[in-house]
Amino acid sequence: MNALLRIAAWLLAVTLVGLPVYAVLNGWIAGSRWPMRHLVVTGEFRQVSDTRVRSAVLPLVQNGFFAVDLAEVRATLSKLPWVHRVEVRKRWPDRLEVSLVEYRPLARWGSNRMLSENGELFPAPKGLGKNLPLFEGPESRASELMAFHSQARPLFMGSGLRVAIVRLSARGSWNLTLSDGCEIEVGRGDPQLRLARFARLLPRIDSADPREIKRADLRYTNGFALTWREPAIASPPDPATQAKS
């Protein structure tokens, strides 16, 4: 019996000591004695605002220093658009430090995703990044689309054009659309060589023919085929306007 009493007394003592500690750690009591007074947010912000971060963190620090769940804070901030990586730490007695790293977008991927400079796909709000090129192709070959765009982009800078769309079919055929709407069918097999040859001759083509190129097919061994845009048909003058003049 004495042994049972000693065990019961020991359990009661542990409970009396442990319960207040557990309550403090969960913010049930004494949260106002150790409040979080300082939130330090660091990072190179381009898309995520400091205000947005603070608004997301504020509800999670209301119960005091010990009750702040760093994993919960990290998970909440990771859900914000553009956030790539989050680091969170507490500094005694009243400081929470948050460090954010944003995705650096290279291109749009579909209607609601982007491709980062590190080759990672991430969700992005619709309508953003319209000035970025659009990539279309198998996700497993995202690195190839990045490399091809990197090689193609400088080829057309001299003509004042951007590479607006890069497409890679499941069979490995390349297709580009330039910023003036010209579609370039590059095909397979030495696509960089074909594209470089076309880009080199493009200024001479433009100077020889004022018409705009609608489509260029580079899938030929020793040349390429061009399709020209139809010239705009001028509207006939309004007879009523002529009569007034």
Image (cartoon, rainbow, N blue to C red):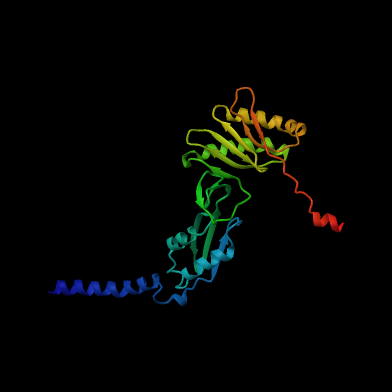
User: x, y (%) of residue 234?
Assistant: 75, 46
Q: Nearer the viewer, residue 2 or 144?
A: 144
Dividing the picture into quarters, in which one does residue 242 lie?
A: bottom right
The quadrant of the picture occupied by the N terminus is bottom left
The quadrant of the picture occupied by the C terminus is bottom right
Dividing the picture into quarters, in which one does residue 210 lie?
A: top right
Seen at 55% across and 51% down, the residue is: 103
Q: Nearer the viewer, residue 56 or 17?
A: 56
Seen at 55% across and 54% down, the residue is: 101
Give the farthest residue toward the right. 245
User: x, y (%) of residue 124?
Assistant: 53, 54
User: x, y (%) of residue 108?
Assistant: 56, 48
Above or below, 240 relative to 11: above
Seen at 55% across and 53% down, the residue is: 102
Q: Nearer the viewer, residue 84 or 39?
A: 84
Above or below, 4 relative to 139: below
Q: Nearer the viewer, residue 52 or 179?
A: 179
Q: Determine whether, in the image, residue 142 is placed left or right of residue 161.
A: left
User: x, y (%) of residue 154?
Assistant: 67, 37
Give the farthest residue toward the top. 222
Badge count: 0
Q: Determine whether, in the image, residue 208 is placed left or right of residue 73.
A: right
Give the farthest residue toward the left. 1
Above or below, 106 relative to 60: above
